[in-house]
Image (cartoon, helix red, strand yellow):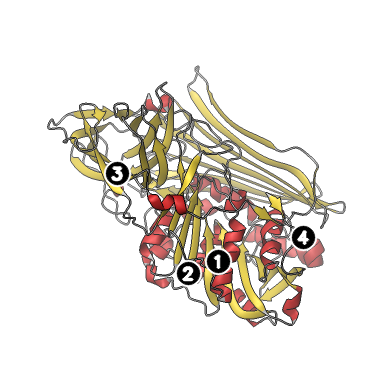
């Protein structure tokens, strides 16, 4: 990244500004704005998240907010109620209170003497959710939004459930927020009442996974704040981006298809990162694009920001399997609209135990293939959403394929490029009332190495309805469709396209209550690929992105080294297998505030042999904050197990001051499995 120290506008910063809510709670904000805005008001941009502006996101915030402010905007970074130095408590994600607070924040910003009354919202992940959800409420000052790594469907396309099956990230991300929501405010900012504020957070805390497990089907809990329930609610322009390695790769094209507002989409090779910090690379000059977006929609500058394709996507070249990549080779392609007239459907039938070519007739035989996968299928699946640290992308799929039902093409005569969401249509029967069909699409090189391109999951009880799942009738045949995550990928000549079907995908997906033998019938089964021509003339005229740039972050001194680990082990005596994940940032000091922070997160997923009742997930966090005269620590631990009838949650929360435990609470709760 190129750090910029000369910007069009001189700026000033206010590190702690309080914004009053209607119930008397005050939210804490950090504001960067042009010095001249005292006399010449400017538009304002809000980022609204729970991740501690004073320390944990301060490095990242300092790269993009001063940069945008230096181009003529007031940038306001607000911690949600109950986080950082904001008062109150944070009880769950995307509650009504959170969105009404956001509206109040926007109203406050629009009324400030340095704001001209026009506002935008931007962010990644939670910040993007907040922007989209707030925009759907149509606050009067909000003119446009910029989103990265988001979804419009909280049930079907978030970290909780996929195809009606529970993701292990439902536990992992609950563990993240169990820790973040119980951290103390900074005494240097809020003064002596920090203990009272901290105690209020600790007293109110509950493991978030408990609430998420109580809603195993699509219901009003998930419908709330899901734009997919009413796309007409969005009336302001949107710039939407994500990455193919992210869990949120689907929402960009879905948003382009369904909203009727000025819109642009951008999908790169990235994991869960902002595009100017994108990993795997190449990263792009995203902040330049954001400034152009705000210039047009907040200042009314006719700068051609809406010219060119509606969607820009990184067409990824074939690569050997790896758990991480520094760069993904490829090229940018553009689509004038979505769905795009450039994309056609290639239907590949399952026939003769293989995957046919487009145009082949379906098998005339009613041949059945059976699969009952071991629990080990999925141990090399990587994370639902990659962060590219520690290495968390899927590894070589050959070992996974040993426990799967595999169909593949003959070596390809020519290059095949896909852009969009593949889908498997299959005719299946199960010997159990609850079963999963997990589908992986892979690129198989001539030497046999297999790189997963994309995947999809279906809890077969959700085959007809996310709201009202129905148990399978053992032995009965069903027609089902499994959509796979959207992707852009080029299969080279000589490679094979492989589709692999399994009945488990643990630990990425929590297993069904018990094993199931699944029969897949050739006659009614096909793979549909969204195929794009290689030589679309408009691709050659695309405007290139600038190099990544931003402002230099403040000095941070590393006091201890970070640690990253992703380890799979198997004991061949008792057949116990474990996936251990460690993400430790180490201890570091932010020199501008003097605060020291440490963050260590550990996840562990284990199972024994083929015992579906042995699966166990654990998320444990330690978060430290301190100065020479202040030392606090929060430790959380959540363990999730299950049997055929229920999920079992065992959790602990401990708070420490000066090495002495000052708070402790334990939860032991059971929640019925209602996802049939």
Please tell me which of labels 1 and 3 falls first in the chain. 1
Front tag of 2 and 1: 1
Q: Name the residue tied to disc 4.
A: 186
Rounded to the nearest angstrom, the CA distance separating label 2 from label 4 is 37 Å
The answer to which of marks 2 and 1 sits earlier in the sequence is 2
First in residue order: circle 2 vs circle 4: 4
Relative placement, left or right, of 664 versus 172 is right
Whether residue 167 is situated above or below residue 519 in the rendered picture = below
Instruction: Please give left or right for residue 194 compared with residue 316 in the image.
Output: right
For label 2, the residue is 237
Residue drawn where x is 25% and y is 28% of the image? 354
For marks 3 and 2 on the same chain, the one whose residue lies earlier in the sequence: 2
Q: Which residue is mark 3?
A: 460
Closer to us: mark 3 or mark 2? 2
Q: Which residue is mark 1?
A: 293
Q: Nearer the viewer, residue 545 or 590?
A: 545
Of marks 1 and 4, the one in the foreground? 1
The outermost residue toward the right is 628
Q: Nearer the viewer, mark 1 or mark 3?
A: 1
């Amino acid at each position: 990244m190129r750090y910029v120290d000369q910007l069009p506008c001189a700026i000033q910063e206010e590190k702690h500004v309080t914004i009053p809510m209607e119930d008397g709670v005050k939210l804490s904000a950090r504001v960067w704005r042009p010095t001249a805005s005292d006399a010449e008001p400017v538009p304002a941009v809000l980022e609204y998240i729970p991740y501690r502006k004073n320390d944990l996101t301060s490095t990242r915030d300092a790269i993009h907010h001063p940069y945008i402010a230096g181009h003529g905007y007031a940038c306001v970074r607000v911690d949600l109620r109950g986080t950082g130095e904001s008062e109150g408590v944070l009880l769950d994600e995307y509650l009504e209170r959170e969105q009404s607070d956001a509206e109040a924040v926007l109203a406050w910003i629009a009324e400030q003497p340095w704001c001209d009354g026009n506002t935008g919202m931007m962010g990644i992940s939670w910040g993007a959710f907040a922007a989209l959800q707030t925009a759907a409420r149509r606050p009067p000052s909000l003119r446009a939004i910029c989103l990265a790594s988001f979804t419009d469907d909280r049930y079907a396309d978030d970290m909780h459930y996929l195809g009606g099956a529970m993701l292990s990230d439902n536990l992992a991300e609950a563990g993240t927020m169990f820790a973040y929501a119980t951290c103390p405010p900074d005494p240097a900012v809020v003064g002596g009442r920090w203990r009272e504020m901290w105690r209020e957070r600790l007293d109110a805390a509950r493991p978030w996974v408990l609430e998420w497990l109580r809603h195993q089907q699509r219901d009003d809990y998930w419908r709330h704040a899901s734009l997919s329930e009413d796309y007409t609610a969005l009336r302001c322009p949107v710039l939407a981006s994500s990455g193919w390695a992210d869990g949120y790769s689907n929402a960009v094209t879905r948003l382009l298809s369904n909203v009727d507002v000025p819109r642009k989409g951008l999908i790169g090779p990235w994991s869960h990162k902002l595009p100017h910090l994108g990993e795997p690379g190449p990263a792009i000059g995203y902040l330049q694009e954001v400034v152009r977006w705000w210039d047009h929609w907040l200042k009314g500058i006719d700068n051609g920001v809406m010219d060119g394709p509606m969607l820009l996507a990184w067409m990824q070249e074939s690569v050997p399997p790896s758990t991480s990549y520094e760069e993904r080779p490829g090229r940018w392609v553009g689509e004038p609209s979505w769905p795009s007239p450039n994309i056609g459907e290639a239907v590949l039938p399952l026939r003769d135990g293989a995957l046919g070519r487009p145009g082949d007739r379906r098998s005339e035989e009613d041949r059945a293939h059976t699969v009952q996968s071991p629990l080990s299928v999925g141990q090399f699946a990587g994370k639902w959403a990659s962060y590219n640290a520690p290495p968390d992308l899927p590894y070589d799929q050959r070992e996974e394929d040993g426990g799967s039902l595999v169909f593949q093409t003959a070596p390809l005569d020519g290059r095949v490029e896909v852009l969009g969401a593949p889908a498997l249509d299959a005719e299946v029967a199960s010997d159990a009332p609850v079963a999963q069909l997990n589908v992986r699409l892979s690129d198989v090189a001539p030497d046999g190495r297999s790189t997963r391109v994309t995947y999809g999951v279906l809890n077969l009880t959700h085959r007809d309805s996310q709201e009202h799942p129905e148990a399978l009738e053992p032995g009965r045949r069903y027609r089902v469709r499994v959509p796979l995550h959207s992707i852009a990928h080029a299969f080279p000549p000589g490679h094979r396209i492989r589709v692999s079907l399994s009945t488990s995908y643990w630990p990425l997906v929590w297993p069904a209550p018990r094993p199931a033998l699944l029969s897949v019938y050739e006659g009614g089964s096909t793979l549909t690929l969204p195929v794009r021509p290689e030589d679309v003339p408009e691709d050659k005229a695309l405007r290139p992105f600038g190099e990544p740039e931003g402002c230099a972050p403040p000095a941070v001194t590393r006091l201890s080294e970070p640690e990253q680990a992703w380890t799979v082990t198997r004991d061949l005596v008792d057949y116990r297998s474990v996936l251990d994940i460690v993400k430790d940032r180490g201890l570091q000091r932010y020199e501008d505030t003097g605060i020291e922070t440490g963050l260590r997160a550990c996840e562990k997923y284990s199972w024994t042999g083929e015992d579906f009742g042995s699966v166990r997930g654990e998320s444990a966090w330690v978060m430290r904050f301190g100065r020479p005269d202040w030392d606090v620590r929060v430790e959380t631990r959540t363990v999730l197990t299950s049997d055929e009838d229920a999920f079992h949650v065992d959790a602990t929360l401990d708070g420490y001051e000066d090495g002495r435990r000052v708070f402790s609470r334990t939860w032991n709760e059971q929640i019925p499995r209602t996802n049939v």
